Image: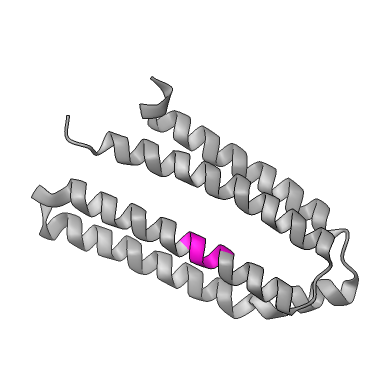
Amino acid sequence: MFTNDLIFGFVIFIGAVVINRFLAEKALKWLSAEEKARLLDSFSGHRIFHVVAIGILLLFFLIGSRAWPNSLTTLVWVILVLLLLMSLGNGLFSYVKLKNLSIPKRYLSSFVVRCVIYYGALFVLIFAIGMRNLPQ
């Protein structure tokens, strides 16, 4: 069935990322040069933090999979839940930051739509990965 197919999850996720990028580029055209500069400056440190946090999760998974090979299913689920929580936290942080920057409502609405698309696809991917790692 498609809901248990890992390839299906990846296709949905990659499709959502492409749609998300298209919508983000379209939304950027609604901002003035000054608003774009404020947007870029305000998120520069946060992007680095997010990449480091994902790197730490990956390192934790690699070390954990070698240290506890019999608990791989549990480890995968812990990493997936942490990844989902981190992503949701990132989305919430970004939304609050955009509101505080007084970004136009049209851009903010586009951001919310992009989040729904992204997190919906991320949930499908995590579900597909998780189902693959449940005991048979």
Quadrant location, the N terminus: top left
Q: Is residue 132 magenta?
A: no
User: Which residue appears at 35% of the width and 40% of the height?
Assistant: 129
Magenta part of the chain:
87-91
Q: Is residue 122 left or right of residue 92?
A: left
Quadrant location, the C terminus: top left
Query: Residue 92: percent from the left, percent from the top?
Result: 57, 66
Q: Is residue 78 above or below residue 15?
A: below
Residue 30: image quadrant is: bottom right
Query: Residue 78: percent from the left, percent from the top?
Result: 27, 56
Q: Is residue 21 left or right of residue 32?
A: left
Magenta span dominant secondary structure: helix
Q: Is residue 121 above or below residue 107?
A: above
Q: Is residue 26 left or right of residue 54?
A: right
Q: Nearer the viewer, residue 106 or 28?
A: 106
User: Which residue appears at 61% of the width and 49% of the height?
Assistant: 116
Q: Nearer the viewer, residue 97 or 17?
A: 97
Residue 33: image quadrant is: bottom right
